[in-house]
Image: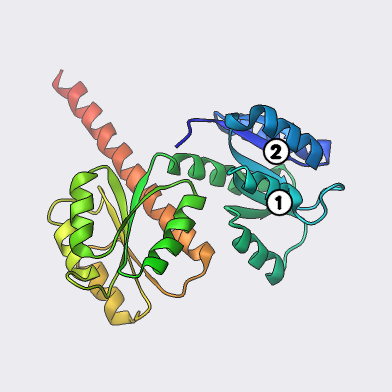
Amino acid sequence: MSDATGVLIIEDSPVQAKIIRKQIEALTQFNCVCAYSLNEAADILKRQGNNFFIAIVDLNLPDAPDGEAADLCLASNLTTIVLTATFNEQLRAGFIDRRVADYFFKGSIDDMEPLVNSIERIYRNGKVKAMVVDDSKTQRHIIRHLLEVHRFTVLEAEDGIDALKKLKENPDITMIITDFQMPKMDGLELVREVRRKYRSYQLSIIGVSSAGSGSLTAQFLKNGANDFLTKPFEVEEFYWRVNQNIETLEVMSALKECRKVMNEARDS
């Protein structure tokens, strides 16, 4: 995953662009570049495209009234967040189809915190390795693509046995998303085997099944899963649960490191 730390802001209002840029640069380590039209954005991407990991794009520009600026960024393999003054189900479906990473209403500086949080989370995801476990190749690819939109590095496994092999080969995996019904070893058995070595604060497991019920959810959680999703799920729910689980792992890791430093200071 690229170590680029630039943010491209595409917004035709200089005032709005300045608000976004100042807030991002005040609260993060990221450097922002502003473009005020589709043509200017295309020129910047041509010259500096490798400097950016994400683009914040106004959905409707004078020279790109139908989201063409977002399409430009997506075609350049740039993670894209859309800003919109209006919202309806048709627009939402379009965002999902285009594989937009997130979307927010345009507003004042007081509305910037969720946007900045999303940018930071997506950046940190670039250092996270996840594994999708499902005997259906189609279902694996669906979840893989969702994760890759948020910059995760993703591995695939076709059943529990394959997943344990991949985990042994890649001990830096920190999230597993596993289906329940699989041959050789189902999702519950996989959870139990993973928990023999990895605690819930070291590796997050999310169970997924179209045969979801209260009982199945309870079985996954009782056997050591951190979370559970019933298919079909909404894309926003998927991202919220995935990112919340990663956030929890990061907090636990920080607390463990803090405790270690305190103990070393006490014993010195």
Residue drawn at x 44%, y 53% is 243
Q: Is residue 251 shown above or below 217?
A: above
User: Which quarter of the picture shows residue 56?
Assistant: top right
Q: Which residue lies under the disc numbered 1?
A: 83
> 28 or 136, which lies in front?
136
Please rate how many residues cluster around mark 1, counting C-alpha atoms within 10 Å: few if below 14, some from 14 to 19, many from 20: many
User: Which quarter of the picture shows residue 48?
Assistant: top right
Q: Which residue lies under the disc numbered 2?
A: 9
For the N terminus, the image quarter is top left
For the C terminus, the image quarter is top left
Tell me the kind of residue under disc 1.
Leu
Residue drawn at x 52%, y 40% is 120
* Residue 222 image point, x, y percent: 21, 69
Is 161 on the left-hand or right-hand side of 106? left
* Residue 179 image point, x, y percent: 31, 69
> 108 or 204, which lies in front?
204
Tell me the kind of residue under disc 2.
Ile
> 197 or 100, which lies in front?
100
Task: Residue 108: tell me if it is visible.
Answer: yes
Residue drawn at x 21%, y 64% is 160
Most extreme residue toward the top is 268
* Residue 59 image point, x, y percent: 75, 52
Dot 1: what SS?
A: strand
Residue drawn at x 67%, y 51% is 82
Dot 2: what SS?
A: strand
Task: Residue 36: tell me if it is visible.
Answer: no
* Residue 210 image point, x, y percent: 38, 78
